[in-house]
Image: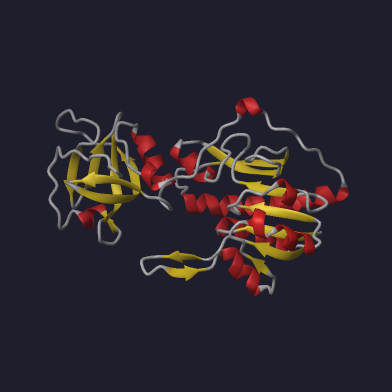
Amino acid sequence: MKIIFMGTPHYGALVLQKLLQSKHQVVAVVCQPDKPVGRKQILTPPETKVLAKHHNIPVYQFKKIRIEGVQTLKNLDADIMVTAAYGQILSQEILDITKYGVYNVHASVLPKYRGSSPIQWSLINCEKSIGVTILKTEAGLDNGPILLTKEVPILDSDTVQSLMQKLGEIGADLMLDALDMLESGNYKLVPQDESKMSYYPMLKKEDSSIDFTKTANQVVGFVKGLAEWPVACTNITGQTTKVFQAQVVNYLAERQYQPGEVVCASNKLGLIVKCKDGFVRLTVLQPQSSKQMRDTDYLNGRKIAVGTKLLPINFN
């Protein structure tokens, strides 16, 4: 098949790589425009663009694909479009361009976790499993009929990055199976059960404040889910501090503590905080105007009194 591939981040690049190694022909790659990255705001191309250029495949970076992209995509005379974390909603006019339509590689077992951040929200919600769905894209958000799904467990060691890698590889293999099924005509599209639908929005900076009234497991899941963006944070003695890693710990406290209170601040044992039902250790931190560091290193140069209350961030 002649494929127009639409995808932007690493997850999309994993799917694109498998398509490039297959018997099918990728005639073009569509991704989001280059973006400034890092403190120096260096203009950086998406991974899918870099991969496409390496294989001498045309790349299109429409600011608004519904306005700029229709005629260009029609002129490519492709059989199918494949999307994987592209980042823009496609109009019905675009959905109707190719013979087979548009098929999406979505990182959840639909109809659960529709939306743009299913991996992150699955970690935040302490899910025990996750998966990939190949669905035909229709007008709406991740609501089209399902062709294939595969579910896998979420391990305690999993992070956004590890799940992105795992699901990108699984999704790529599923998409190759889907293309074979579509070519043969031997397939069945199954409508989604709307009664089981859940939708989660894109994460924003305003969502990043840690709530220590949650359980210890929920706090750790929250930190994991936000580790790439926007990064969980809390107010430690008046300073906004990012938290990149945390873990549930057993701790014998000398007295009763309230959620959010520091129960240990030692350069040997680390920074341990009371939650609703137990304790978490904030293991990797980044204070304002500083670099990431272990909590033990953070506490080398800072004295935090036991009983100090870590406060929510006010983003107003």
- Position of residue 294 relative to residue 274, above or below, is below
Q: How is the image coloured?
A: secondary structure
Residue in the foreground of this view, choosing between 77 and 18: 77
Residue ranking furthest to the top: 195
Taking 153 as reference, is 267 left or right?
Answer: left
User: Which residue is pictured at 46% across the width and 49% down the height?
Assistant: 159
Q: Position of residue 280 (x, y in %)?
A: 29, 40
Across and down, in percent, residue 14 comes to: 61, 59
| x and y, in percent, of residue 249 in the image | 30, 39
Inspect this view and state whether residue 24 appears: no
Q: 59 or 150, which is in the foreground?
A: 59
**What residue sits 69% from the left and 41% below the top?**
139
> Relative to 223, is 64 on the left or the right?
right
Instruction: Say which quadrant the N terminus sits in.
Output: bottom right
Quadrant in which residue 310 is drawn: top left
Q: Residue at x 70, y 71 (%)?
A: 57
Place residue 45 in its image quadrant: bottom right
> Where 99 falls versus 30 (above or below)?
above
12 is higher (above) or lower (below) than 247:
below
